[in-house]
Image (tube, coloured by chain):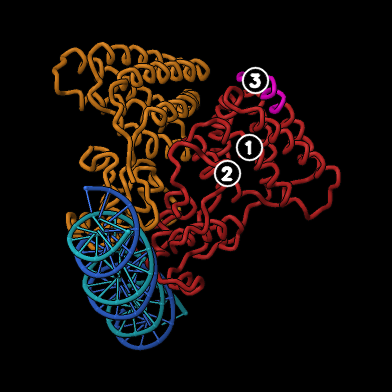
Chain colours: A red, B orange, C cyan, D blue
Amino acid sequence: MVRKALGGQVTPEADEDATGTLAEQLFHMLTEAILQGELAPGSKISEPMLAQRYGVSRGPLREALHRLQERRLIVRTANHGARVVQPTPEMLAGIFTVREALEGLAAREAATRMTDDEISALAACVRRHESELQEWVDGRHNALGKADEDFHFRIAQASRNPLLIELLCHQLYPLLRLYRSRNDNRTLRQRALVEHQRVLGALVDRDPQLAELTMQRHIASARTRRTLALGASVTSEDDR
Amino acid sequence: MVRKALGGQVTPEADEDATGTLAEQLFHMLTEAILQGELAPGSKISEPMLAQRYGVSRGPLREALHRLQERRLIVRTANHGARVVQPTPEMLAGIFTVREALEGLAAREAATRMTDDEISALAACVRRHESELQEWVDGRHNALGKADEDFHFRIAQASRNPLLIELLCHQLYPLLRLYRSRNDNRTLRQRALVEHQRVLGALVDRDPQLAELTMQRHIASARTRRTLALGASVTSEDDR
DNA sequence: CCGGCTCCATCTGTCGACAGTTCCTGCTTA
DNA sequence: TAAGCAGGAACTGTCGACAGATGGAGCCGG
């Protein structure tokens, strides 16, 4: 009956979802809606509108909104309502700076804590990434983005640090998806693959220092790519 | 009448507090109550009881609880209620590991971004710490703890990274206060003062690398002190 | 023609009440 | 006597409704 009664172990894949309570479901639905772009960045969130749209009352909806506020996906001002967060280049740079530190830490910890099975799974993940890159078809970049995220997700899990896992997987990665748009071309992904292989190699060698360094350089490389590609994304979009 | 009617500019210092809305007030009150120990770690939270205690309805209270859940100060399970988070030595170690990375990053960024005035203020903070240490009186460790936190708080602010500031000041530092108990003696605080002076020196020299390293060593040193002092606090773990 | 004021529609914040579930208590029965 | 079951009390989850506040439309005066 109880689904997450376990105390200290973290299931590597199973995300919490469909927990039964409406507020929980709404929280996940709204998170996806924001990250998918269904709720436009900067747009105002009307509680009655959303309540009708999802067929629920305003009570659970407001509870979900308060959680989204803590996740920095929406901004609430008293008596003015909530707005979807507006991504800025400065915030993106800040996210990558923090990510470089945290993912480097995760890779360093993973180098000593990862099991052989997990390393094998990670290697398979990289190979899948590679094969997907060979049979490239435009319009599939969505699946590729997931393969990339899966790589980082597995390393975060292998750090065995619940707080670090939470910060990376549940806070930084979602925020990054706000910026993940049409800036994935083949050259960049090939570059990312090479860097992933380097990190994997360091993990196979159980070399914490090298794992941290290769991961940090990978994030830094991704930052320059992302910020450069973001140059033309000045959205003139706004509504009040 | 309108308190924060401005639209696009964010006030650099003013923290949200006493916003008028009950859910917001409750969120801060409950945060303080948990961190102060008024709500015992691991204890169950009864919504009707808390609602009566603060003289509000369950609606705003539940909204505040959902925010606390995202801050990892309480744990909620569906249809079972909420419990104040139970600190564990493993979690403490994880917090310090993350903190070492993030505060090192903050110190590195602060070395180049901090203004001269901010450095002066930080130096004054360290001197105040020093003078308080000289006129030591037992029972005042609470004020000293604030002085220490103020030091790290200022450096975090000087990183100019909103996400980093949020993670450190609003997530990690509160979590740390859960463990801050009666383990502050004079020798340890003297040691901390010396380390603070080293970090300050690196910042005065505008040396990012040295600032990061001294801060990381300071956190690591604090970790060993804290975890050692925590040896006897093995609370009999159970619930449910 | 434009600036300011008034009134109103809408929304957010808050409350009380109802339904479903869980846990505890007490009784029944082997 | 102990295990199992039924009943009820209390709590969580959810909903609809009311009060205060905000923003805008429209009117009036300069």
Give whichever of B230, B195 is nearer the camera.
B230
**In the image, which residues are magenta?**
A199-209
Give whichever of B168, A140 is nearer the camera.
A140
Q: Residue at x 56, y 47 (%)?
A: A14
Q: Quick check: do tags 1 and 2 share a chain?
A: yes
Q: Is residue A208 magenta?
A: yes
Residue A173 image label: 2
Give whichever of B29, B124 is nearer the camera.
B29
In the rendered image, residue B114, in percent from the top left (x then y), is placed at 44, 27
Chain under callout 1: A
Q: Quadrant of residue D16?
A: bottom left
Q: Nearer the viewer, mark 1 or mark 2?
A: 1
Of label 1 and label 3, which has the lower sequence position?
1
Of label 2 and label 3, which has the lower sequence position?
2
In the rendered image, residue A36, in percent from the top left (x then y), is placed at 61, 58
Q: Name the amino acid type tagged 2.
A: Tyr
Q: Nearer the viewer, mark 2 or mark 3?
A: 3
What residue is disc 3 on?
A206
Q: Quick check: do tags 2 and 3 share a chain?
A: yes
Q: Residue at x 28, y 25 (%)?
A: B233
Circles 1 and 2, Cβ within 8 Å, touching? The answer is yes
Residue A152 image label: 1
Q: Is residue B196 above or below residue A237?
A: above
In the rendered image, residue A11, in percent from the top left (x then y), is placed at 54, 42
Q: Is residue A217 above or below residue C16?
A: above
In the rendered image, residue A85, in percent from the top left (x then y), is placed at 50, 54
